[in-house]
């Protein structure tokens, strides 16, 4: 089992990401890719509103197919994951990414967890609060093939308050060239986005987000419906009901969060 080396730890602290080359074998990639395509086909059947060319982020991967179970603690990555985050860990969310050919960036520059989480910049020797590992299931042979983009070391800097204009490119931003089977672990504060896909292939990957056991999962763990049914909207929100928008972003920034939580209460100081 691959474990975290001193060099990897130094890279993690300084750059905010780790590239694990060849984390999955070719056979494993083929199996996960075929499971991904099945999930996507089923998703399209049940979501006819999803337009053919739109990038997809399909959450709750493990619930949709048992074929991803082995990624929860995959032998070639789990040692590194545990060494980084410690033994009190959990899966906080899983997402299949599908990036179709398009001249636009499907996702602009951002950090994970929105404006709130990126303000928590833990000390370099601290355990991370959470991070994602992204397994690439298709080759990304050169720039502008829906590459995962990031700014090495940006997790140690303030993300610009006004964000980045569409297609704007931060200084020192790079595009990751990767082979199917490679994986990248990146911390929530790393500035990242997705390059346009000027090729002909559909880029597919799957992401698992790990977090400390004390923090709230993304995909599950809310009070049962019969408990929620008797509550006020604020109580339901506090008990984990984020409303009908189940996209990953809605877990940390539901659009109606201020209305629901601050109903009748003055906004707290920042
Ligand atoms: O690489 C991708 O397609 C998406 C990466 C990303 O923006 C994310 O995981 O938040």
Image: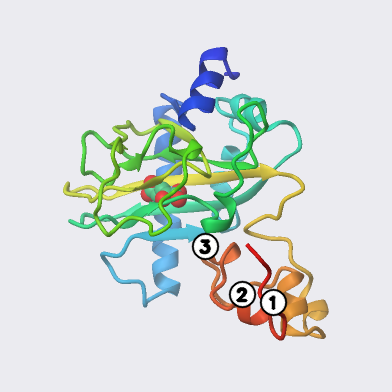
Q: Could you say whether the residue bearing mark 3 is in a helix, strand or loop?
A: helix
From the viewer's perspective, is 66 left or right of 55?
right
Q: At which x and y percent is residue 208? A: 55, 45
From the viewer's perspective, is 164 left or right of 31?
left
* Residue linked to disc 3: 249
Q: Using the image, tell me which numbered label, if any, was put on residue 261.
A: 1
Can residue 79 be seen here? yes
Work out whether 88 lies above or below 199.
above
In this rendering, which labeled residue sits more in front, label 2 or label 3? 2
In this view, the residue farthest toward the top is 6
Residue in view at x 63 percent, y 35 percent? 73
Residue in view at x 57 percent, y 71 percent? 254
- Which is nearer the eye, 205 or 64? 205
* Residue linked to disc 2: 257
Work out whether 231 lies above or below 219.
below
Q: Earlier in the sequence, mark 1 or mark 3?
A: 3
How much space separates mark 1 and mark 3, taking CA atoms? 17 Å
Q: Earlier in the sequence, mark 2 or mark 3?
A: 3
In the picture, the quarter occupied by the C terminus is: bottom right
Q: Could you say whether the residue bearing mark 2 is in a helix, strand or loop?
A: helix
Q: Could you say whether the residue bearing mark 1 is in a helix, strand or loop?
A: helix
Work out whether 127 lies above or below 251.
above
How much space separates mark 2 and mark 3, taking CA atoms? 12 Å
Residue in view at x 41 percent, y 71 percent? 45
Do residues under tags 1 and 3 come within 8 Å of each other at their CB atoms?
Answer: no
In this view, the residue farthest toward the front is 269
Q: At which x and y percent is residue 204? A: 36, 47
């Amino acid at each position: 089992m691959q474990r975290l080396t001193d060099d990897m730890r130094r890279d993690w602290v300084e750059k905010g990401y780790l590239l694990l080359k060849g984390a999955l074998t070719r056979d494993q990639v083929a199996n996960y890719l075929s499971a991904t395509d099945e999930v996507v086909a089923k998703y399209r059947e049940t979501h006819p509103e999803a337009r053919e060319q739109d990038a997809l982020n399909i959450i709750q991967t493990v619930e949709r197919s048992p074929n991803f179970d082995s990624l929860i603690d995959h032998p070639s990555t789990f040692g590194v994951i545990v060494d980084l985050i410690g033994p009190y860990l959990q899966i906080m969310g899983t997402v299949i990414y599908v990036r179709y050919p398009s001249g636009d960036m499907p996702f602009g520059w951002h950090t994970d967890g929105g404006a709130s989480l990126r303000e928590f910049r833990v000390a370099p020797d601290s355990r991370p609060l959470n991070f994602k590992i992204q397994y690439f299931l298709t080759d990304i042979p050169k720039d502008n093939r829906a590459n995962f983009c990031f700014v090495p070391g940006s997790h140690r800097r303030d993300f610009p308050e006004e964000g980045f204009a569409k297609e704007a490119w931060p200084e020192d931003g790079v595009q990751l060239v990767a082979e199917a089977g490679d994986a990248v672990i990146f911390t929530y504060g790393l500035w990242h986005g997705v390059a346009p896909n000027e090729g002909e292939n559909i880029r597919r990957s799957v992401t698992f987000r790990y977090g400390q056991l004390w923090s709230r999962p993304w995909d599950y763990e809310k009070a049962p419906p019969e408990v929620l049914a008797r509550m006020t909207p604020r109580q339901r929100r506090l008990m984990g009901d984020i409303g009908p928008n189940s996209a990953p972003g809605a877990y940390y920034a539901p659009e109606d969060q201020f209305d629901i939580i601050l109903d009748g209460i003055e906004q707290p100081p920042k």
